[in-house]
Image (cartoon, helix red, strand yellow):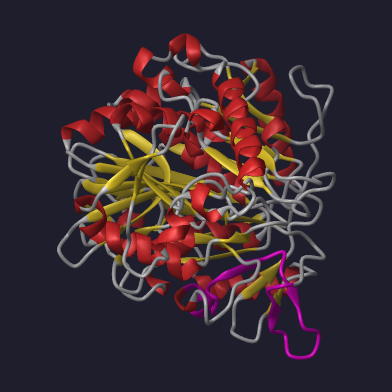
Amino acid sequence: MAPVYYRNLSRAQLVEHALRIEFDSKLTNTGALSVNSYAKKGRSPNDKRIVDTEDVRADVDWGKVNIKLSDASFLQLRARALDFFERKEQIYQVDCFAGHDPRYRLKIRIFTTRPYHALFMKNMLIEATAAELESFGSPDFVIYNAGELAADRTVPGLTSETCVALNFKRKEQVILGSEYAGEMKKGVLTIMMYLMAKQGHLCMHASANEGKSGDVSVFFGLSGTGKTTLSADPHRALIGDDEHVWTDRGVVNIEGGCYAKAIGLSAEQEPDIFRAVRFGAVAENCVLNPVTKAIDYNDISLTENTRVAYPLNFIPGAKEPAVAGHPKNVIFLTNDAFGVMPPVAKLTLAQAKFWFVTGYTAKVPGTEVGVKEPSPTFSACFGGPFLVMHPTYYGEQLAEKLQTHNADCWLINTGWCGGKFGVGSRIKLRFTRAIIDAIHDGSLSRGQFAEMPGWGLRIPTACKNVPSELLNPLTAWQDKKLFYTTINGVAKMFESNFQKYSAKATSDVKASIPKAINASKL
């Protein structure tokens, strides 16, 4: 018996289907759909593949991030997915757009066997109107999500029963062996990372917002650095929380929704996000109170990567369409668990390229099995798993944009001060927000700066509503000897990590690598 195809159902219909056919799907006390992605609770970057076709071969930065797959192997995976679809009772089709600017947006069609996945992508991409669906025509890219079925690991090029394969020539993505919805979302980002770069636009794994005067800020940052939290500013319009393109006209959101980390979410700290978890939203891998059905945002028994996905318009004052002008400020967020980086520094153009390509943050003990001490994490351009071309290519694109549009670039540490994790304390959110406010009103840029020895970072000497002793990490640490030992160790980590990019880096960028500090000469 052939499956029934459900095309472009409403959110309410998809919720109804999920509650009927997905065993672990439930409604929370606020009406959000609580779902389980089962074995995979996050992306599987080691299972990502790009098909090696002649049209992309010379452009792709092949290696550990972009692993080659033959077209023949892709066709085997595709056939397996389609055969699985034919054996299911129902298939869900979603037609949406990627990109709010009609000049560059892509038509994306998703086929999936789970209504949860359909609702997720209906939230994350830009929902087509009834009129747009009538004229939708052929899609620019198709995603076949057969994640309930394991991949055949005997297919040449595969190393596990999970595979997320992207074929630019066929304009298709096939997902097998993972029911984690984020694979679809990040697949679209990877597509845009390549196609936009080829057109001269900078695709960014970043959030963005706009002030009342029309000034735009872009926030880059890896998971846990505050990218979603800091862009959801009650005094500014949210453009988007994760994926944007800096085009010839300004900043454009790729998505139509937000995908926020749910761990520790509270009405007090993040009221807009907290209130967005309502009917139509997806609560992924969250634990519910068995009686009240309220989400326990501190329960990480299923995973630390609990997430909520909701439409952009669930955030009050979000900008629609999500298009704005050129950024005035570009902000790199890092969670430095070593506690040696200043809460804020203003970067030169060369430093901006270095810190962008480096993409630094740090894990703290307890976040992953085996992490006993602060551990550095480097993800090129704050989105390493999604880059298709070499990181320095995107770095040069960013530098050109900053220079052309006279934008300031800032490095903000949302991590530790006064000592590393376990010794110092995490910088309070209210201080980070005060720093962001001072960037936005221009007072921080107009103030005085002191240069950080060895690192060359320009540190403000004062910032309204931030204790001055916190601005310089040296003054924030009580144990000065331990500070110099720690900061020099971190400098060596940066130097070692940058070796893989140095062959294609310019001399000014190489000069921006942090250097060891000789405390006896200060």
How many numbered badges does the structure rendering display? 0
What residue is shown at x 55% (from left), y 32% (from top)?
A: 519
Query: In the rendered image, which quarter is residue 133 located in?
Result: bottom left
Decide: is 249 above or below 430.
above
Question: Can residue 335 be seen in this snapshot?
Answer: yes
Judge from the rendering whether residue 28 lies leftward or rightward of residue 346; answer left or right.
right
Residue stretch in magenta? 273-298
Judge from the rendering whether residue 7 lies leftward or rightward of residue 34; answer left or right.
left
What residue is shown at x 52% (from left), y 76% (from top)?
A: 269
What residue is shown at x 40% (from left), y 40% (from top)?
A: 204
Q: Position of residue 464 (x, y in %)?
A: 31, 67
Query: In the rendered image, which quarter is residue 434 located in?
Result: bottom left
What residue is shown at x 36% (from left), y 60% (from top)?
A: 435
Decide: is 282 above or below 85.
below
Query: In the rendered image, which quarter is residue 55 located in?
Result: top left
Which of 162/141 is in front? 162
Question: Can residue 174 be seen in this snapshot?
Answer: no
Q: Position of residue 210 (x, y in %)?
A: 26, 60
Which of 482/455 is in front? 482
Name the residue at the bottom extreme. 292
Q: Position of residue 54 (x, y in %)?
A: 48, 10
Which of 401/411 is in front? 411
Decide: is 329 above or below 117.
above
Q: Position of residue 481 (x, y in %)?
A: 64, 41
Q: Is residue 378 magenta?
A: no
Q: Is residue 285 magenta?
A: yes
Decide: is 106 above or below 423.
above
